[in-house]
Image (cartoon, helix red, strand yellow):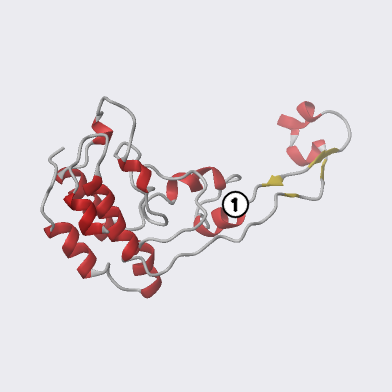
Amino acid sequence: LRDELRTLSCTYKCRHDAAADLIHMYAYTKCFFRVREYSTVKSPPVHISPLDLGPKYADKLGPGFQEYCKTYPEDYCLAQLIYWYSQNSEPESRLTRARKGCLSLPDVSSFYVKSAKPGQERVYGNRTVRFMLSRMEKQAQRPWPKDRIWVFKSDPRFFGSPMMDAVLSNSPLDKEMVHWLKMRPNVFLG
């Protein structure tokens, strides 16, 4: 499929060559996983006294105890596992961006658009490929930037990437996969 896609002609709206590269990366991904779906959970109430807040904020709370409950969304557990090192009351808000590229690969629809005008983010040339390979090899844990051609599903059903495989196996990226991406000929310069 990868090689057949690369034989088709490309335009800015229809990037078969980029889709072939993505299919190549999906083919070399060994481990795909789903995140267990948790329900939204509401914490038991915590009673806060004006004295708990100190004199500066005691007047703002009002007299007597106030009740507070926190709602934890479905992806809170995954976000806590990923952002264990960063204390944040809502780590799930950063999760969507963080998984792009390193935990999940782009959607193939990234390379097929209806827009007639190609913007800078629609370019998939040598520079974009070199950037992608550099990020994969040297900074596999970092998310891919949003100002490029890639589009990621906001709520993916499964995760997996060659970079995640490398982490799980405690080894470098698959050399054969990287070699093909570096050596394949360009079929569309744009």
Q: Which residue is mark 1?
A: 75
SS of the residue under disc 1:
loop
Above or below, 166 relative to 88: below
Q: Nearer the viewer, residue 54 or 178?
A: 178
Residue plotted at (23% across, 52% down): 5
Percent x, y for residue 93?
A: 54, 42
Q: Residues within 10 Å of mark 1 (few under 14, many from 20)?
A: some
Query: Can the viewer see residue 150?
Result: no
Quadrant that contains the N terminus? bottom left
- Does 55 sit left or right of 11 as displayed? right
Quadrant that contains the C terminus? top left
Above or below, 64 relative to 150: above
Residue plotted at (78% across, 31% down): 58
Q: Identify the image quadrant of residue 14.
A: top left
Residue plotted at (38% across, 70% down): 30
Percent x, y for residue 106?
A: 37, 49
Percent x, y for residue 130?
A: 18, 50
Percent x, y for residue 182?
A: 15, 58
Q: Nearer the viewer, residue 102 or 69?
A: 102
- Does 145 sit left or right of 98 as displayed? left
Kind of residue at badge 1: Asp
Query: Can the viewer see residue 181?
Result: yes
Q: Nearer the viewer, residue 99 or 176?
A: 176
Residue plotted at (12% across, 59% down): 183
